Image: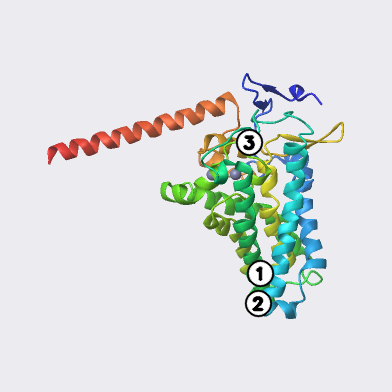
Amino acid sequence: MDDLNFGKRNKRGDWAPNQPAETAPLFTFPPQLAAILKWLPHYFLPWNLIFAVSALAYWAWIIPPVETMQTLSLGWISRLYAVNAIAVFLFYGAFELHLYVLKRQENRFKYNGKFPAEQKSNAFWFQSQNLDNILRTFLSGVMIWTAVEVGMLWAYANGYAPWLGFAENPWTLACVALVVPIIHEFHFFCIHRLIHTPFLYKWVHSVHHNSVNPSPWSSLSMHPVEHLLYFGTAFYHLILPSNPMIMLYQLHYAGFGAIPGHVGFDKVEIGKDRLVDSHAYAHYLHHKYFEVNYGDALIPLDKWFGTWHDGSPEGEAQMQERYRRRKEKLAARKARLEAEGAAE
Ligand SMILES: [Zn+2]
Ligand SMILES: [Zn+2]
């Protein structure tokens, strides 16, 4: 597959798509019905379907009976951690193996021409992005994911969370399942914007941003505080009329759904001529420029708040203009403070 039919590569070997990143056609006024219909299959395929089906499989085979979950005990909790860890190892590992170990598509569709293994950095534990990212994923990421999951299941089992049955409330639950990605997007944008404030960025979020050139294991490489905020997306189901299966889908959307945004490739080649879009470009630009694209473009929040960068020269110019205005504002404030200081 020739990736130059879809984008261009610069002298450094970085590839960029010809098409700028786009926000989903939802929440536009007036509504663009044709665009929504064209986009709709992407809402489900392939990623959301994978996360929803995995939640169903968990409910069918992994989650213990309600009576067991009424009491917290090490047995079922450690089993759940083990299953989550194995699932993450297999799912994340598959991308790592395909794209970064066997390098089956070399650097075709790869945003950053370099592979993280080629660059040692003191920002990482053992100077290795992969080792650092993997340890953070299993020691803290999967641990906190499981803790939130256990807390929610315990709440359901003891009647502390609204649990609707599918037979009696099919339409309500279908609607809640449908907005799971939208809840995630709203929640992620809010917490992400919050941890980009100077204090929290320095102590919490900078851990995730150490991976300027993200790869699959970067997805859940975060500070424990960020893990808790990130998986806190499940807590909406403490107040929503929902069901534990949909709550699991919400968690899987966060846990497994972090992968597409960090694979580092715009498209994943499957076989000889099939391509799967990762929709990772917006988040790749976030890792590259830090202060753009706080959301994943499902709700155009970044457009509304003026932080959207679609990768085009116009997007770049807007970002530079924003930086310039902020610098001016800071310089003006400094000058004012100095003048006040001199007057005293
Ligand atoms: Zn990221
Ligand atoms: Zn960030």
**The residue tagged with tag 2: helix, strand or loop?**
loop
Q: Residue at x 66, y 48 (%)?
A: 258
The nearer-to-camera label among 1 and 3 is 3
Residue 150's tag is 1
Q: Quadrant of residue 141?
A: bottom right
- Residue 294 seen: no
Image point (42%, 46%), residue name: 198
Write down the residue under mark 3: 116
- Amino acid type at circle 2 is Leu
CB under 8 Å between discs 2 and 3: no
Residue 313, position as x, y percentages in the image: 57, 24
The numbered mark at residue 72 is 2
The spot of residue 283 in percent (x, y) is 61, 40
**Disc marking residue 317:** none
- Residue type at mark 3 is Pro
Left or right: 210 as drawn, with respect to 325: right
Q: Name which of mark 2 and mark 1 comes first in the sequence.
A: 2
Number of residues whose C-alpha sits closer than 10 Å to that of mark 1, classed few (under 14), some (14–19) or many (20 or more): some
Which of the 4 quarters of the picture holds residue 27? top right
Mark 2: few, some, or many residues within 10 Å (few <14, many ≥20)? Answer: few
Query: Closer to the N terminus: mark 1 or mark 3?
Result: 3
Task: State the residue lying farthest toward the top.
Answer: 11
What's the CA distance linking mark 2 and mark 3? 41 Å
Q: CA distance from mark 1 to mark 3?
A: 34 Å
Determine whether label 2 and label 1 are within 8 Å by CB.
yes
Element under disc 1:
helix
Is 226 positioned to the left or the right of 269 in the image?
left
Q: Residue at x 23, y 39 (%)?
A: 337
Camera-nearest residue between 122 and 320:
122
